[in-house]
Amino acid sequence: MASELIELKGHIIDSLSLPRVLDDILAQGGQFEIEEIDIGKTRPEPSYARIRVSADSEQTLEDILAFVEKDGASRVWQWDAELAPAPRDGILPDDFYCTTNLSTEVRIAGRWTPVQDIEMDCGIVVEDGVAKTVPMNLVLAGQIVVVGHRGVRVEPPERKEVPGAFEFMTSEVSAERPKGLIVQEIARAMVETKSRGEKVLLVGGPAIIHSGAGPCVERMIEDGRIDVLFAGNALPLHDIESALFGTSLGVSVKEGRSSAHGHEHHLRAVNTIRKLGGIRQAVEQGVLKSGIMHACVEAGVPFVLAGSIRDDGPLPEVITDTPRAQEEMRRKLKGVGFALMAATVLHSIATGNLLPARVKVACVDIDPAVVTKLIDRGTTQAMGVVTDVGLFLVELEQELRRLAAGKVTSER
Amino acid sequence: MCPPDYYGVEYEINPWMDVRRNATREVARAQWNALAGALGSLPGVTVNVIEPRPGLPDMVFAANAGLVVGKRFIASRFRPPQRRGETPHYERWFADRGYQVERLPEDIFFEGEGDALRSGDTWFVGYYFRSDARAHERLSGLLGQETLPLRLIDPRYYHLDTCFHPLEEDSAIVYPDAFDEYSRQVLHDRFPRIIAVSDEEAERFCCNAVVVGKTVITAAGCPILRGDLERRGYDVRALGFSEYIKAGGAAKCLVLGL
């Protein structure tokens, strides 16, 4: 949808200039929204209207503007974005425009150009008339970067006519929620994402394994419900420990009892995988026969494991160079339309930072502070679910199966 | 007024003009003299004359030079390049006589009294073919009065004064088909006792009238309008403007009110 701001000044009410222009916009196939109107209080006092005109295509918009300009409407004077070269590799120019996660356009040579790969807290690089976000650490010396706020416009999030759970619960975090309804909404959102041809991302923490939800997630991966997995060292390691020893941090996942020398299990697990060269090799050599990571390898679901300072081992696939991990996450986020963040603070916020606001996010944690934190860091589209992640995932997996069964039934 | 020493149809900037049908100089001169004489004979009217300049055949149409309000002269910005040379001469004439000369921004076309006529405290400003719609807003800023833009839709009636002339506060001579429906609505709202002229009489430039008190000087050959005006107590003086109609003008176009 192309749009442009116009303004109309003078005696536009009594002369019927305003209704004429508005009628013309509609008659020419456009739409309008009056952003501001100030009507003169006396006859000699002029009035003012600022109107956003939008149309399906740039061409229709141009035609409409050319038409209404003859009736006195003029484009609100708009500036091209100011540009400056990056002074050094990894350094943005002073006063660089800092992105949000909302759809953004920059005006280059009089044309509004959409910014590609929108991501919050980045700069905008312009090359060959194409604008795209670039994280600070990846900018190269001499790249042309948008500075200041002129010539940049951010589209506010779409307004929805019919509120669903994602609308009326957005930005509010509370344990006082009908969980069943939320689980249904999330399951439906996951199915819809897939049907649009987009991917579902799971960002998971180790509590998934402690709480016994590992097998649910394993099934969801096997059933093709999850297309990408982000985690740290802990989730895959506990998952592998559970697959190799039946314990998570030494506690039997099935019986809940501590095993003798169980505390050694996760170190032995990481040592085993390191010895084999990695998770994939462990699966290929038949050592790792079950669990989430096994399912990922078998189903070809890509995963990015981003390390942190307290990791044991770590597993060979864990990326310990943080900027490189971010880059890998960025690459794997292409095509993601829904993100389920379960029981991890660090990786949820890190992923939220990389996601455009149009991607729906559900954040499940027993601690309300996690969701609040995620939203406060700018992932305002996140819907918070305060509950035990194990119970939640079990219900979610069942709901997904119910939806799939319903679909099969209706197809017959 | 500007004598027709250099008047002629030398280019075509409106549908009336056809360089193959030039004005007859002697007839044009006689028609101009008749108008000047009729005006000068009205009580309280003095005719001032500006020196005509060669190469500016339309300078004769003084109404398009600008707008006079008290001791201020708001100069025109002509859309046709052929007429832009007239402006400095008119500006100098007014400046020499103590008028304050004012100009609109360079990107706004405005053709003076041809497109701006006052009724009571309201200015009616024609736009589309010659003046820009945005001119009305600038004028309202300069004049501090209500200025209502009126959209012209017929290229034959390219100036407001070719299809509209206010009489008293509640009446005006109007050729309705020259306006779009919104502007027609505005005219009907503002002038409940409107006199709508016919196609034939509009083509004879009957709207292009000079009104002084209860006297209306207009083009000959418009008996219906004449009857309407006389019934309302006006003294109608019908004069010939055949040579000026060849360039798309008549009585009103030849006169700029001071």
Image (spheres, coloured by chain):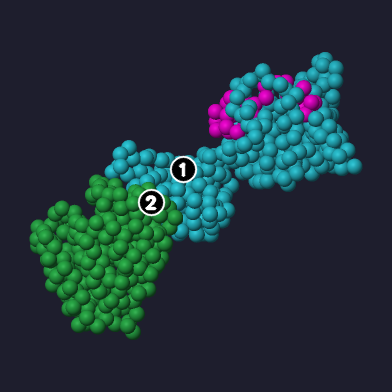
Chain colours: A cyan, B green
Taking the spot 24% from the left edge, 69% from the top edge, the residue there is: B238
Cβ atoms at labels 2 and 1 below 8 Å apart = no
Horizontal and vertical percent position of residue B4 = 19, 76
Numbered range of the magenta stretch: A371-396
Figure check: A171 above or below B178: above
Residue A81 at least partly seen: no
Q: Residue at x 72, y 45 (%)?
A: A196
Mark 1 element type: strand
Same chain? Circles 2 and 1: no
A205 in the magenta segment: no
Residue placed under numbered mark 1 in the picture = A34
The amino acid pointed to by label 1 is Ile
- The one nearer the camera, B213 or A22, is B213
Q: Is residue B189 left or right of residue B34?
A: right
Q: Give me the chain letter of mark 2.
A: B
Give the CA separation, mark 2 to mark 1: 28 Å
Q: Position of residue A408 (x, y in %)?
A: 87, 39
Q: Residue furthest right?
A: A412
Where is the N terminus of chain B found, in terms of image quarters? bottom left
Residue A337 in the image: state x and y as whole percent.
Answer: 68, 41
Give B64 or A74, whichever is nearer the viewer.
Answer: B64
The quarter in which the C terminus of chain B is drawn is: bottom left
Above or below residue B9? Residue A387 is above
Which disc number belongs to residue B188?
Answer: 2
Amino acid found under the numbered disc labelled 2: His
Whether residue A393 is in magenta: the answer is: yes
Point out residue B127 in the picture as x, y percentages from the top left corner: 35, 59
Residue at figure coordinates x 84%, y 25% from the top left: A245
Q: Is residue B68 left or right of residue B124?
A: left
